[in-house]
Image (tube, helix red, strand yellow):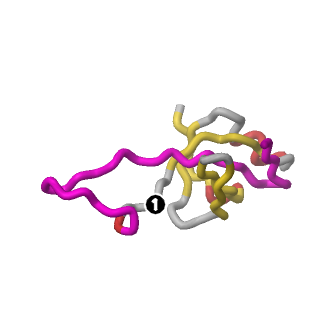
Amino acid sequence: MKIHPFEERVVIEVQEQGEKKVGGLIIPDTAKEKPQAGIVVSVGTGEEIQKMVSEGDMVIFNKYSGSEFHIDGKDYIILAKDDVLAKLV
């Protein structure tokens, strides 16, 4: 399924962090921090967002922003242009 956001938005495939162990204990999912990085899957039609990122870019975004959803076993998030903080190059 292809997802295409409107205007100044971008769809990110969330990259999960590796499982962390603290002192031999596994941290449960409820205590883990939310991911802040992902790969751009689709870019909206807005002029500014198209200048900022393109499909395949790895980006860092605000921790508690966007709308999360789950399709075909993968986690995605739709972000507004202002929630994308940086592109990793």
Task: Tell me the quarter of the image containing the N terminus.
Answer: top right
Residue under the point 28% across and 60% down = 27
The answer to whether residue 27 is left or right of residue 41 is: left
Front-lying residue, 37 or 28: 28
For the view shown, which residue lies furthest in the front direction? 72
Front-lying residue, 40 or 1: 1
The answer to whether residue 29 is left or right of residue 7 is: left
For the view shown, which residue lies furthest in the left direction? 23
Whether 16 is drawn above or below 55: the answer is: below
Whether the magenta-drawn stretch holds residue 13 is answered as: yes
Residue under the point 60% across and 47% down = 74
Residue under the point 54% across and 60% down = 62
Give how far across and how far down residue 42 sits, in percent.
74, 42
Give how far across and how far down residue 85 sits, in percent.
57, 52
Whether the magenta-drawn stretch holds residue 3 is answered as: yes
Where is mark 1, residue-wise? 34
What secondary structure prevails in the magenta region? Answer: loop
The answer to whether residue 77 is left or right of residue 50 is: left
Residue under the point 47% across and 54% down = 35
Q: Amino acid at mark 1?
A: Lys
The answer to whether residue 17 is left or right of residue 3 is: left
Give how far across and how far down residue 70 sits, in percent.
64, 55
| Range covered by the magenta-colored residues | 1-30
- Secondary structure at badge 1 equals loop
Front-lying residue, 51 or 24: 24
Q: How many marks?
A: 1
Q: Residues within 10 Å of mark 1 (few under 14, many from 20)?
A: some
Give how far across and how far down residue 55 sits, in percent.
70, 35
Residue 66 falls in image quadrant: bottom right
